[in-house]
Amino acid sequence: MRRFLSVLFLLLLLGAGGTAFKAWQDYKNPGPLLHDSDVVIPHGDYLSTIHTLQQAGVLQSGFWTERLCLVAVLLTRHDGQLHAAELHFPASVSMRDALHIMRHGRPVLHKLTIPEGLSAHQIQALLQAAPFLTEDAPLPPEGSVMPETYSYLRNTSRKNLLERTQAAMTKAVQAIWNQRTPVPEVPDETAFLTLASLVEKETAVPAERPLVARVFINRLRLGMKLQTDPTVIYALTNGTAPLGRALTHADLQISNPYNTYRIAGLPPGPICAPGLSSLNAVAHPATGDMLYFVANGQGGHSFAASLTEHNKNVQALRQRKEADHPPTPQE
């Protein structure tokens, strides 16, 4: 900055006061950018960088601005190198502040949110559709991705971002597994992750997840089939898309290792990516002898320890549905 001002002062002494004054004003005054903008500054020389800023509307177009900015870059080069990156420029940013941003600004971070309960195919599609990533998204193993929001730089590869999501899941599973309340029905991390995925798909109410986990653990202990609908849906779709219809009696009879109406024990692997709430629910299930649960018609579930009690809960649900949707009178 001092050197830049010294050059302007020298121009004044040499009689170029008007030019020096205009240069200083154009250097520090607000620029032409109408809106906050993210601009990709590619690798190249100073002139190509200046042209990028002019094309993006950060700097005025024209030879005067080009030469003024080039002189400003050279005279202030002791402030640091200009960086090639995607950078954020506020509206009306001055040439002086634009140079500061290119030297000291942080690259723009984009965000991708992976919700809980998505299948591997759904996560692959989400990654494939995410903007500013490169290469195609691989299909991850089912349940290997940690659902959360991830930040990434432009031109990150989808493979690298996927590996970050998988590393996050591995870290979370190991940490929660090491602090779990051990139960023989969940002997290893694969069973742990698989059971958490069932809990994830059965309820969206966090407070219910330890109860659902306890139901499944009790059934595993007694050798009862889990009989959970989401596993049948996964058997029918392989997680590629929603089923789009209600399950039928015939669906429950299909021969498939994921059909927990036909097989005993857990399915061979996860059916979705469970979130932290479901992982913690399996690590620390509720206490109790409940073996059944059914929707209560109010967004949650009713739990029961006996078939008699469960049948009462089912009947209560039917009555609630009939009360909410009475039959249309026949004329």
Image: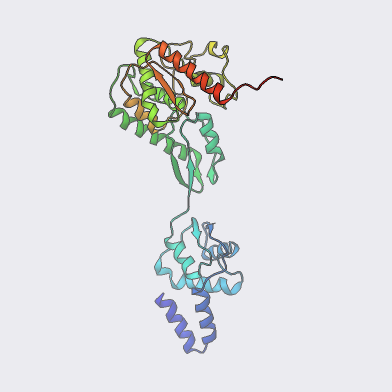
Is residue 226 in sight in this rendering? Answer: no
Question: In terms of depth relative to the viewer, which is nearer, 52 or 296?
Answer: 296
* Total numbered labels placed on residues in the image: 0
Q: Residue at x 47, y 53 (%)?
A: 108
Quarter of the image for the N terminus: give it.
bottom left
Picture quadrant where residue 240 is located = top right
How far from the left and from the top, in percent, is residue 96?
Answer: 47, 70
In the image as oriented, which residue stretches furthest toward the right? 331
Picture quadrant where residue 78 is located = bottom left
How far from the left and from the top, in percent, is residue 263?
Answer: 46, 11
Q: Residue at x 61, y 71 (%)?
A: 62
How far from the left and from the top, in percent, is residue 225?
Answer: 43, 12
On the picture, is 7 further left or further right than 281?
right
Is residue 88 in sight in this rendering? Answer: yes
Quarter of the image for the C terminus: give it.
top right
Question: In terms of depth relative to the viewer, which is nearer, 237 or 63?
Answer: 237
Q: Residue at x 39, y 27 (%)?
A: 209
Q: How is the image coloured?
A: rainbow
- On screen, 172 above or below 100? above
How far from the left and from the top, in percent, is residue 61?
Answer: 61, 69
Question: In terms of depth relative to the viewer, which is nearer, 204 or 15?
Answer: 204
Question: In terms of depth relative to the viewer, which is nearer, 101 or 271?
Answer: 271
